Image (cartoon, grey):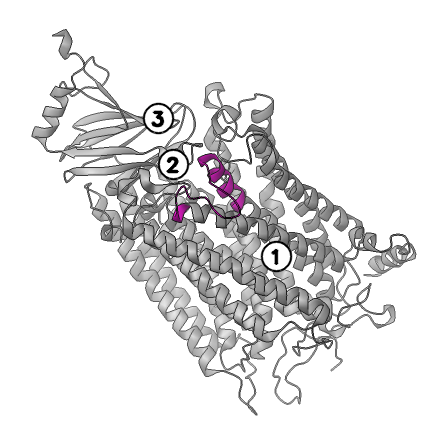
Amino acid sequence: MAHSSTAHAHEHAHDHGPQGILKYIWSTDHKIIGMQYMFTGMFMALIGGFMAYTFRMQLAFPGADIPLFGVVSPGEYNALVTNHGSIMIFWVAMPVLIAAFGNYLIPLMIGADDMVFPRLNRLSYQIFLLSAILIIASQFVPGGGFGGAWTSYPPLSANPAYNLTGLGATMWLLAVALEFVAFLLGGINFIVTLMNARAPGMRAYDIPIVVWMIVIASILFMLSVGPLMAGAVMLLFDQTLGTGFFDPGTGGDPILWQHLFWFFGHPEVYVVLLPALGFVAEIITVFSRKKLFGYKTVLYTAVATAILSFFVWAHHQFVAGIDPRMANVFTVTTLLISIPIAEVLFVIIATLYRGSITLTVPMLWALAFVAEFLIGGVTGIFLGASGADIYFHDTYFVLAHFHYTFFPIAIIGTFAAVTMWFPKMFGRMMNEKLGRIHFWLTVTAFNFIFIPLFILGTAGQHRRIYDYNHFPQLATEGLQDLRIVATTATVVLLLSQVLFLFNFFHSLFKGEKAPDNPWKSNTLEWTTSSPPPHGNWPPDAMPNVYRGPYEYSVEGREDDYWPQNQPA
Amino acid sequence: MPQLFLDQASSYAHEIDNLIWIIAAAVGFWFIVAEAVFFGFILKYRAKPGQRAAYIEGTERKYTRFISYPHMIIILFDVVLIAGSIRVWYLVKQQLPDADRTIRVIGQQWAWTFVHPGADGELDTDDDIRMVDELHVQVGDTYHFQLTSTDVLHSFSVPVFRLKQDAVPGRTITGWFQPTRTGEYDIQCAEICGIGHGIMAAKLFIESPEDHAAWIAAHNPTASLQ
């Protein structure tokens, strides 16, 4: 703590350097970097959303001239689905959930003046920005964007003669690798900051659960990404130098990539899930005025989930040509992971018990997360059970399942967090009424997209096909109607976001001024001004911590909340 | 549930469908219970003037048992589902019943080639019948398939059989199926394989013994030599 303060004071002395817009671009302030990540992530979400619009339109109206895009060729279709998936995971979910809110919240919630490595933090964002520019640029090179699916399985991804998007494939791979570097730097910073920069008096169990979740996610990311980085380098060499790590013709093995990819890819699900669960836990405690039910249970189940997530990866590969006996092992581990996840959801539901619930906009989002994520959770069992996965693998059932996990995580979770912390970030309140309309439109449209896709998947519709007319059993009128329903809902969902953007930017400048603690919350970020100054608190008023973060409705107190920094 | 949309055309299709129903019942139960309690709490514990929330640590035995009992029941459900899943998996993928005939399935960008044994019932003889995007099989016979690929990954997917297996270049993967009803059905490629992935469709013809024999006779590649 002392160390970080002096480092910061030193930083302050040079703060006169960049002025104006440069102050925002070249800042080392964790709040500014968090917002840089948030705005970049929001911008990338618009691109990813537009891609979803184009390929959904093609599926509903095959061969049509799509407004704002034109006719989608099979090659473009593949590039669109590939980059939609890649962008939404690597350039939306990760930067917004972990980097934006990790950066913004961790120092504020633990009572630190900044991250312990502010310059490393700035470097992390700059590398991330470079990776984002690279993935966007890759859409416009000769041959177009990479079209080999976000999983990038070789030999298709390794050989330009097979994927016909040689340059796009290499740029995709470099962009993903750079993005990993950015998050490794950021993750190291989060972990070290939590360990070293907590306010005096903040013990392990006084740390707000969302901070734990983001840090556990960062550790999980660091431990799982190494093998994939090695794999990415091997794939890059296969693409550009003609090595044959994944080419069976020269003694390589294409399945090796799948192991390296999913050894990272499955923990990655929990890397983004844990921060979202953290937001939900914070919001639900605040708006039900309740102590989090079993703090330690939540923490330990998160750790258990993180550990178990390293042993489930091959459930993505049941029918990929692995030894069939191995599937039995991975079925067991996969179904076991349902136990801690169910536990943490039960605990969140139990927190509502005998609460005093107010349905504010952030609370609506947090509750919607639980209701919708449950669907994603239970449908995962069909896919983790090897016997049933033989049928469901690579159908739209899988697609609908993971959108019922990722949409609650990355979109609902993000809206929960943005609406919750907007007053702190910008010192203004968002419009409540617009927020509600946006909430109901988004959540309703979301269900109208993906419930039809569950049905289509059950009917045998396989993934990444640009026109189902080539498959007579899938070209029926009934199934086509379902595709049109899903596409219509996609358009409604995307248009609804105009309301959010309007609300966001209008409130940013014209919103009602926010008090320091509009939600009467206990955690430390609400004890400073809205927005907090550079350094978060005045140097002589850094907070001390006297209790845990969830002391709501304590008996015998007049207030139903008890901020962490208030002496007893 | 797939049988609501698709015929069950292999000996194990109903096993997979039944497993899917069992899972649906188990997870459906938990889903309904969890959502009911969840929405019940939201309705019941809405903020009312003058009423405060309770202070509950979540470590008291009288409350934690509402978490730990469901927890134990979930473990029990998991054991049942694991057993059911492994049983079906073993049947379809891990064992290989004796074959009446063997076919070869070759994936390539962007077509399926099927090598059928001719009248002699043996592969790799002069009367093998090679067909592109057409697989002809005889109802009731047990088939082994030898699956491979010449370029990238493909996935041999026959929804009415509930069968799916990736084709991997450099490997030959053997599996089995036994068609149980006649008809014409889709064969898909279920693993993205390049720009033609969307047109990599083939047709499955399940024929009665008479029809199948007639088809073999009509397609005998050595017929003109005899």
> Quick check: B168 above or below A67?
above
- Viewer-proximal residue among B18 and A44: A44
Mark 3, residue position: B148
Viewport quadrant of the N terminus of chain B: bottom left
User: Does the segment drawn in magenta span residue A69?
Assistant: yes
Who's the residue at 65% across and 62% down the image? A211
The label shown at residue A454 is none
Kindly state the secondary structure of the residue where label 3 is placed: strand
> Quick check: A5 above or below A289?
above
Give the chain of mark 1: A
In 3D space, how far apart are the residues under numbered discs 3 and 2 (Cα atoms)? Answer: 19 Å
**Which residue occupies the extreme bottom position in the image?**
B50
The label shown at residue A97 is 1
The residue segment tinted magenta is A59-85
Viewport quadrant of the C terminus of chain B: top left
In 3D space, how far apart are the residues under numbered discs 2 and 1 (Cα atoms)? Answer: 34 Å
Q: Would residue B87 appear left or right of A265 to someone viewing this image?
A: left
Give the chain of mark 2: B
In 3D space, how far apart are the residues under numbered discs 1 and 3 (Cα atoms)? Answer: 42 Å
Q: Amino acid at mark 2?
A: Gly
Mark 2, residue position: B198
Kindly state the secondary structure of the residue where label 1 is placed: helix
Q: Amino acid at mark 1?
A: Leu
Q: Nearer the viewer, mark 3 or mark 2?
A: 2
- Viewer-proximal residue among A391 and A470: A470
Who's the residue at 49% across and 50% down the image? A53
Q: Amino acid at mark 3?
A: Thr
User: Does the segment drawn in magenta span residue B110?
Assistant: no
Mark nearer the N terminus (3 vs 2): 3
The crowd level at tag 3 (other Cα within 10 Å; few <14, some 14-19, many 20+) is many
